[in-house]
Structure formats: C-alpha cells, structure tokens
Image (cartoon, grey):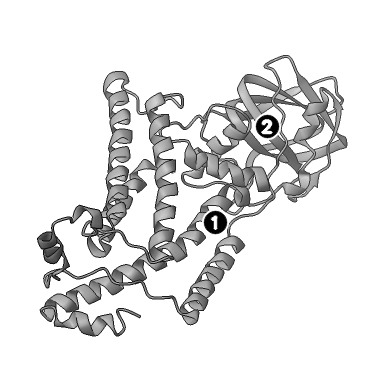
C-alpha cells in the first residue's frame, strides 16, 4: 500500500541472500530497490516541478512501477515456494558442466573449499511444527476477525442536484426532536435542514456541513432541540453523498420517519435506521489511514478516480475487493488487510526458521574451522 514498505523488502532480500546464497533472491532485492527508487523519484519530480506530492493516477511511469511491483510479488511467491517448499537453491557457485571442458579446470572445480559453507538441504517440516503454526494462525485469525469491525454501516446513499431536488419527511405528529444523526459518504458540501410543524411555515436551522474530502465515514450528531413534525432536506452547496439520517428525542429514542415528497432516491436517507449507533467507535467507523485508503477503495468501486493518489493504486484495489464482498463497512474495508496479515505468518515463519538455522550452522562451521560441517550435515542442521 505504501511504497516505503518496499524499503525493508529490499533489505530483507539482501539479508536472505547473504545467508541462503540463492542468486534469485539477490535479484529480487535489486528489483525492489529499483522500483522503490523510481517510485520515489517520480514523487520528488512532481514536488520539484509542480510543488505537489500528488501523482496523477494516469501517470504512465507510476503505472509501470506498480506493474513491476505486481510482477515482483508473483516472482517472490514463486521463488519462495521453490526454496522453502521444494528445497531448491540456486547459488552463484553452481556451474554448467558444459563450461568445464578442461580436465584441469574440472579437477580444480571438484576440489572442495574449506572457507565456504555449502548450501544446506532444507529440512522437512515436522508435523508438530505444522500444527503449532496452524494453531498460531487460527488464534490470530479468531482475535483479528472478532474485533475487526461490524457490518452495520449504511450502504445506500442519496446525492441530489444542488438546489433542484428536495425531500420532505413526516414524523406523523409534532414531536420534540433533540438531535439529527447522519452518516455521509463521498464528497464535500452542505445539506440544508428546514423544520415545520404544519408543512407550510419552515424554520431553517444549522445544516449538515462536510468540508473535508477525507472526513471519516462514521455516525455524527447535530443538535436540534425543537418541536417539529416535518423535515425538509436539500443539498445547498457542493457534491456530497448522504447515506442516512436519523432523528432522536431527548430520551435517545429513534423517531420514525416517512418520506412524503421528493424523488424516490431520497428514501435512501431513512431506509437503514437499524444501522444507527449511539456511540461512534473504531468498530463502526473509520480511523487513521482508513480515511484515505478505504475512502479511495469506495471511489474505485463507484468508478470514480481515487482522490488519494499519493500512493500506488494496488493497495486500494485490494481493499476494494473486501468492500465488494462485504460492503462499505469496517469489516469490509479491513478484511483484505487482515487476510494478507494471516497469510504472512507462515511465510515469515518459514523464512525465519531457515535463515536462523543456516546462520547457526554457518557460524558453527566457521568457528570450528570447517570441521563442524561434517557433524551438522549429518545431524540437526541437515535434518
């Protein structure tokens, strides 16, 4: 999602190469370094020439870097499977037998060097190790998905034209309205709210204003404190999607509304009253960088060019997959991130196990002046 996350990828690739010695891992590290440098270079170029850190999503160079990173990910998975599952390691000491035509050269190549440690065969993973890893993944999955977030966010919205469309809602009788709860969507603007007891004389009160295009998608409360039977809603400025409106009395109880005029699409403001909450938290709303990336994922699904374009689009597209499956709610826009986190557990477990084992065996070999190799090849380091 963030290009800076490729920095440790390049470093880890180089570290794994130094321990394992597989030349393909070195090329992965080099490629990650190049794409990270190119990505940073594009951003710096935009800041230098245009005084803006926002790179257009249509920038060809950035799209090429994103494509290369996707290819890099696929190649990393393929090489990782070859190394950690099949036990195939390709080092720079591997030579083609056809190149050694000189018998003297063949003899020299066949002479073992005592200053190098041969790549160790990868040990088969024991059943108990697999069970332990599966248990860790299961426990983490239960904890993560249990507190990931709820599904109770309004999905339908109304986005009227400025000053041309309005809707009127009826409470059935005059009631004391304490507050208006609202849940908005994409865009910025202001919804004007007018109140009436008879449907003829209207009183304008504070409207719903959203002036931050990255405002959190969550329930907010606007104090009203007046008696009324009718509520008129219209978009007075900007372009703003409104997902839901809910009226509460002074006891905090929901007041039932019925649309009596306006376009049928305006019913979207009162059709998901069961998804209202009295307390807005991270479990039913957004927090931190979700205001950028989950926000952009929702735009992508609506065919809108992502507002947040300072990062490559792949991460937002992946988030959008979860939203498409579960809806635009906390569980939906967090699902793919947690899923990838779970899948990373066996990957890093495999890397850590192999790298640690080879490091121990290499250090032991060098400490023993080469005599240790014959022991560990037939003992724990081999098996």
Label pair 2/1, CB-CB below 8 angstroms: no
Query: In the rendered view, does 252 fall on the left or right side of 26?
Result: right
Q: Position of residue 43 (x, y in %)?
A: 32, 30
Q: Nearer the viewer, residue 49 or 82?
A: 82
| Left or right: 206 as drawn, with respect to 176 | left
Q: Is residue 132 left or right of residue 28?
A: right
Decide if residue 218 is in sight here: no
Residue 288's label in the rendered image is none
Quadrant in which the N terminus is drawn = top left
Q: Residue at x 58, y 33 (%)?
A: 300
Q: Which mark is residue 339?
A: 1
Residue 143 in sight here = yes
Counting labels gives: 2
Task: Pick the quarter of the image with the C terminus.
Answer: bottom left
- Which percent across, then down, holds residue 220? 62, 41
Q: Which residue is mark 2?
A: 242
Name of the residue lying farthest toward the top: 164
Sequence order check, earlier mark of 2 and 1: 2
> Residue 48 at what x, y percent from top left?
26, 23
Q: Nearer the viewer, mark 2 or mark 1?
A: 1
């Amino acid at each position: 999602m963030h290009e800076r996350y490729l920095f440790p990828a390049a470093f880890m690739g180089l570290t794994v190469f130094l321990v394992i010695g597989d030349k393909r891992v070195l090329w992965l590290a080099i490629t990650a370094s190049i794409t990270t440098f190119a990505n940073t270079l594009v951003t710096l170029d935009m800041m230098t020439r245009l005084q803006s850190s926002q790179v257009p999503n249509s920038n060809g160079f950035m799209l090429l870097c994103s494509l290369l990173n996707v290819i890099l990910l696929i190649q990393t998975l393929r090489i990782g499977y070859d190394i950690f599952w099949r036990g195939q390691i390709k080092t720079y000491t591997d030579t083609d037998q056809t190149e050694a035509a000189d018998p003297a050269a063949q003899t020299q190549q066949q002479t073992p060097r005592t200053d190098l440690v041969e790549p160790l065969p990868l040990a088969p993973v024991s059943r108990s190790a697999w069970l332990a890893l599966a248990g860790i993944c299961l426990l983490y999955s239960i904890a993560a998905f249990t507190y990931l977030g709820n599904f109770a966010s309004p999905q339908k919205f109304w986005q009227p034209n400025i000053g041309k469309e309005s809707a009127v809602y009826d409470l059935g009788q005059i009631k004391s309205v304490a507050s208006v709860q609202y849940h908005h969507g994409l865009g910025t603007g202001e919804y004007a709210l007018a109140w009436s007891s008879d449907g003829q004389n209207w009183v304008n009160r504070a409207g719903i204003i959203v002036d931050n295009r990255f405002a959190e998608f969550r329930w907010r409360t606007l104090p009203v404190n007046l008696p009324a039977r009718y509520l008129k809603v219209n978009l007075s400025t900007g372009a703003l999607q409104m997902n839901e409106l809910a009226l509460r009395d002074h006891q905090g109880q929901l007041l039932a509304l019925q649309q009596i005029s306006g376009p049928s699409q305006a019913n979207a403001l009162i059709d998901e009253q069961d998804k209202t909450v009295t307390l807005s938290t991270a479990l039913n709303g957004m927090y931190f960088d979700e205001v950028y990336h989950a926000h952009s994922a929702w735009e992508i699904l609506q065919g809108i060019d992502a507002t947040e374009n300072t990062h490559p689009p792949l991460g937002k597209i992946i988030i959008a997959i979860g939203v498409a499956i579960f809806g635009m709610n906390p569980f939906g826009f967090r699902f793919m991130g947690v899923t990838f986190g779970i899948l990373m557990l066996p990957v890093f477990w495999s890397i850590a196990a192999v790298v640690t084992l080879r490091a121990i065996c290499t250090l032991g070999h060098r400490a023993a002046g080469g005599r240790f190799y014959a022991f560990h090849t037939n003992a724990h380091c081999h098996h």
